[in-house]
């Protein structure tokens, strides 16, 4: 069984070391912290939004059945089907899907663009901290006359330069892979919407074709019945 006091002391030691490293990074650590919060917060928001759509968990045969059974529709996919199947023609259905793609894609593309900016900004801000750290180092070399105080100032400048660079890369690299996975998830969602549009349009086209065939058969039967009626009326009139 682990000693609770040992765990507390280890946590305090790690926290104190982390704070020491943070303080050695200088002013650039605060912008880097803001970039990290925005980037990973936006990424989690996109991830949760994609999972909330439920397109990856719903079997295709289920939502195909929902096209003809509105009463069984559930969740976000059911709401999408309620919206796009309101058209009575192929043109209206296509228009509904265009509106759906615009409504669904704009928020994701905006958030992914913000993530991309943050991924690119993190190493640049780290580089800016590196430059300021090196300037502080050169100032210490120029102004100092040797001794412990000068060496402390030089060490602080070098530490600021290295810590900010490392922090910028530590933020940017996971953010880059995270953004890549989110882009892949968004592309899968766009592919799902395109497949859904294809199925809905094909289904509506088949239904309209069957309706036209039924109407043609109904008109043909009416024409035959009318011809028979005229023949019977004509035979009754003849002596």
Image (cartoon, rainbow, N blue to C red):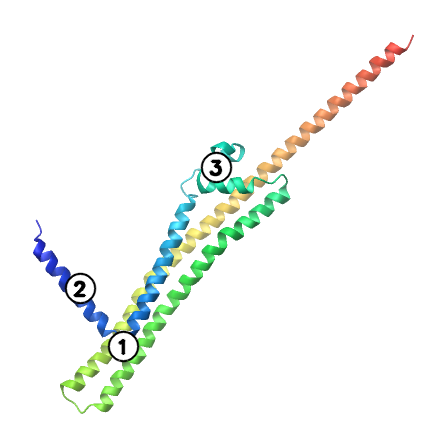
| Res 178 quadrant in image | bottom left
Mark 3 touches mark 1? (CB < 8 Å):
no
User: Circle 1 is placed at which residue position?
Assistant: 161
Q: Residues within 10 Å of mark 1 (few under 14, many from 20)?
A: many
Decide which of 133, 183 is in the foreground and name it.
133
User: Circle 2 is placed at which residue position?
Assistant: 15
Mark 2 touches mark 1? (CB < 8 Å):
no
Cα–Cα span, label 3 and label 1? 56 Å
The quarter of the picture where the C terminus appears is top right
Residue at 27%, 77% in the rendered image: 161
Residue at 33%, 62% in the rendered image: 37
Q: Position of residue 5 (x, y in %)?
A: 8, 56
User: Circle 3 is placed at which residue position?
Assistant: 63
Q: Residues within 10 Å of mark 2 (few under 14, many from 20)?
A: few
2 or 1: tag closer to the N-terminus: 2
Q: Is residue 200 left or right of residue 73?
A: right
Q: Is residue 236 above or below residue 50?
A: above
Q: Position of residue 175 (x, y in %)?
A: 35, 61
Residue at 35%, 66% in the rendered image: 35
Outermost residue on the top side: it is 239
Q: Is residue 219 left or right of residue 57?
A: right
Cα–Cα span, label 2 and label 1? 22 Å
Q: Is residue 142 above or below residue 113?
A: below
3 or 2: tag closer to the N-terminus: 2
Residue at 40%, 46% in the rendered image: 52
Q: Position of residue 233 (x, y in %)?
A: 84, 13
- Label 2 residue SS: helix
């Amino acid at each position: 069984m682990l000693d609770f006091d040992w765990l507390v002391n280890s946590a305090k030691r790690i926290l104190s070391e982390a704070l020491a490293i943070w303080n050695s990074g200088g002013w650039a650590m605060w912008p880097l912290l803001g970039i990290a919060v925005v980037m990973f917060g936006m990424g989690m928001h996109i991830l949760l939004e994609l999972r909330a759509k439920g397109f990856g968990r719903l079997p295709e045969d289920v939502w195909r059945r929902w096209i003809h059974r509105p009463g069984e529709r559930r969740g976000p996919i059911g709401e999408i089907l309620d919206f796009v199947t309101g058209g009575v023609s192929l043109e209206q259905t296509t228009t509904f899907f265009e509106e759906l793609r615009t409504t669904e894609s704009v928020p994701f593309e905006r958030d992914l663009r913000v993530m991309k900016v943050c991924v690119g900004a993190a190493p640049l801000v780290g580089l800016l901290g590196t430059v300021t750290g090196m300037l502080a180092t050169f100032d210490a070399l120029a102004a100092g006359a040797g001794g412990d105080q000068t060496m402390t100032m030089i060490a602080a400048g070098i530490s600021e330069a290295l810590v900010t660079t490392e922090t910028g890369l530590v933020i940017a690299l996971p953010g880059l892979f995270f953004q890549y996975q989110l882009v892949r998830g968004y592309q899968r969602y766009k592919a799902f919407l395109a497949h859904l549009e294809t199925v809905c349009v094909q289904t509506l086209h088949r239904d309209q074709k069957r309706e036209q065939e039924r109407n043609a058969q109904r008109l043909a039967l009416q024409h035959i019945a009318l011809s028979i009626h005229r023949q019977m009326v004509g035979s009754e009139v003849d002596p």
